[in-house]
Every structure is written in C-alpha cells, then in structure tokens.
Image: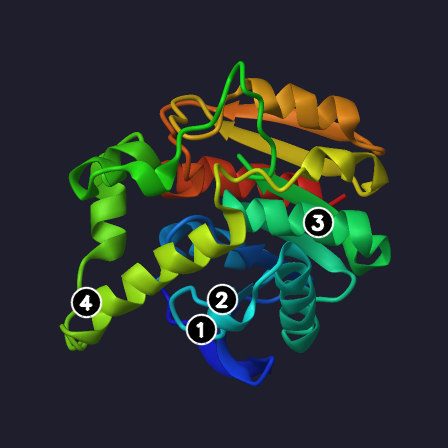
Amino acid sequence: MSEPETVTVEVNGHPCRVWRAGAGPKLGFLAGLGGLPRWVPFLDRLAERRTVIVPSIPGFPGATGHRVLDTHLDWLLAVRQLLLAAELDGADLAGSSVGGSFVAEMAAIWPASVRSIALIAPFGLFDEKDPPTDPWAQRAKDVAGLMCADPEHWTKLKEVPEGANSVEWPIEQNRANEAAARAFWPLGNTRLEKRLPLIGAPTLLLWGEQDRVMPRSYAKRIADALGGRSEIRVIPAAGHLAELDQPDEVAAAILGWTSG
C-alpha cells in the first residue's frame, strides 16, 4: 500500500488529521465505526483514479475535539468545518456507516457542498420493527464479527502497528468508539429520514450482503425518500464495513458512480 500525505487542520480549536493521495478530481471519504487508524487497500483503489482526501472526524483516530460536541447540530457543524478545511467543498463524497450518515447530512443541509455521494450502510434511521444492532452493547470479542463478514479484516485494522505507542494505541481506539457513541447513541437514530428528501445529489447506496448492524431494508427506505437519482447495490461476502471486506468491488462501484 502507498503512504498518503498527512496534514492537520483545526476544528473548534482541536486537531484533525487529513490524508491525501492520488491524482485527479477530488473524492472525499468519511470513515465508519472505529475510524481509520491506518491506511487501507480500499483507499489505494480509490487513489488509482482520484485525489482521495480522508479527513478524520473529531474523536476518530488522528483527531480530537469530540467532547466539545454536545448536540447533533454541533456534530454537523463540526463535520462541515472539517470538510471545508480539507478543501472538499463541492466535491464528490463517500462515507461508510456513521461517516455515511454525515455525508448524507451534508448533502441535505448544504446541497451545493457536494457533487454526488456514495453511502455505505449509513446510520441515522431507526425502525422498531427492524432495528439496527447496537454496536455499543457488544462484548469486545464479538465486535470484529459484527463489523466485517471476515472478522480478520477488522482485527488487522486494529492491530498495533510496528513502532506505535502500545499505551496510546488502545486509548485512541477507545476514543473513536466513544466519539461515535456520543454522536449516534442511542441506536444511531438521528432522524435522518426527515432530511432525505432534501438530498438532490445523485446517491449510490452500498450494502454488505452480510451486514449485521444496519438492516438491508433501510437501503430501500433511504432510496424511496431521496429527492434525487439513486441506485442500490448489494456487495456479496461483505459485512457492515463493506469497504474492508471487499475493497476492490466497493471502490469500483464508487469510482463508477462519481465519474459521471
């Protein structure tokens, strides 16, 4: 895998890491549950055809500042500031899981800020007849199998890299979990459904065939509510974080969708 350029921007006075790699039109990506403690093959695939820019959401690996965000509006404004600082205004955006929810919110509230979007099993909806799995109520040993169809992909993402601070590493991973819980607890229900009709940007919805967190039925609910063109694709042999299980297929889908 290649090594991205790393810069730091400030959001509410707190540092947030921004990765950048590749060449071509800009494509932003907001990571899902757990964030991205390391560069992954999925991002390399995107960078083969685009300038990929990956800002770290407050509290996720490479970023702090989540504890000053108390309301959903606080989070949305922080993400908006982050994308502006990362020079992604008006670009194509993709996001996974909790990151996908933020991408959808940006497209709804600031429609001119995105060209097209791709959402991988986004959080934000809740149906009591078909509820999502609560990722914050799981035993540690069960999380890998919940996030990925192949638990080894999650395990490798979270392994302590050579040369990393063995004390700081687990603290950073726990902080990412705390940040996502702060933004989306309980059960990820931010009432996003009310704002979906405001999204006019072309929207690709990707869902892992074996997603054990967000019910696949939510894909159609989202597509039916959107104000613009959309398409649903199911990724075989993939779990909630489909980009970790099937990086080539997910990247190809996003590149194809956003190249139009």
What residue is pinned by disc 2?
Answer: 56
Q: Earlier in the sequence, mark 4 or mark 2?
A: 2
Which mark, by number, is residue 161? 4
Looking at the image, residue 28 sits to the left or right of residue 115; the answer is left
User: Which residue lies most toward the top here?
Assistant: 129
Residue 158 pos. (x, y %): 24, 55
Using the image as rendered, state which of residue 25 and residue 202 is in the foreground. Answer: 202
Using the image as rendered, state which of residue 155 and residue 212 is in the foreground. Answer: 212
For the residue labelled by badge 1, is the local secondary structure a helix, a strand or a loop?
loop
For the residue labelled by badge 4, is the local secondary structure a helix, a strand or a loop?
loop
Residue at horizontal 47%, vertical 35%? 249
Q: CA distance from mark 4 to mark 1?
A: 18 Å
Using the image as rendered, state which of residue 79 and residue 91 is in the foreground. Answer: 79
Q: Earlier in the sequence, mark 4 or mark 1?
A: 1
Residue 89 pos. (x, y %): 75, 66
Q: Earlier in the sequence, mark 3 or mark 4?
A: 3
Using the image as rendered, state which of residue 24 and residue 123 is in the foreground. Answer: 123
- Relative to 62, residue 157 above or below: above
Q: Are marks 3 and 4 in contact (CB under 8 Å)?
A: no
- Relative to 236, residue 135 above or below: below
Mark 3: amino acid: Glu
Q: Nearer the viewer, mark 3 or mark 4?
A: 3
Which mark, by number, is residue 63? 1
Q: Are marks 1 and 2 in contact (CB under 8 Å)?
A: yes
User: Which residue lies most toward the bottom here?
Assistant: 13
Q: What is the quadrant of residue 257 in the picture?
A: top right
Looking at the image, residue 39 sits to the left or right of residue 159; the answer is right
Q: Are marks 4 and 2 in contact (CB under 8 Å)?
A: no
What residue is pinned by disc 3?
Answer: 105
Q: CA distance from mark 3 to mark 4?
A: 33 Å
Q: Earlier in the sequence, mark 1 or mark 2?
A: 2
Crowd class of label 4 (few under 14; some 14 to 19; many from 20; radius 10 Å): few
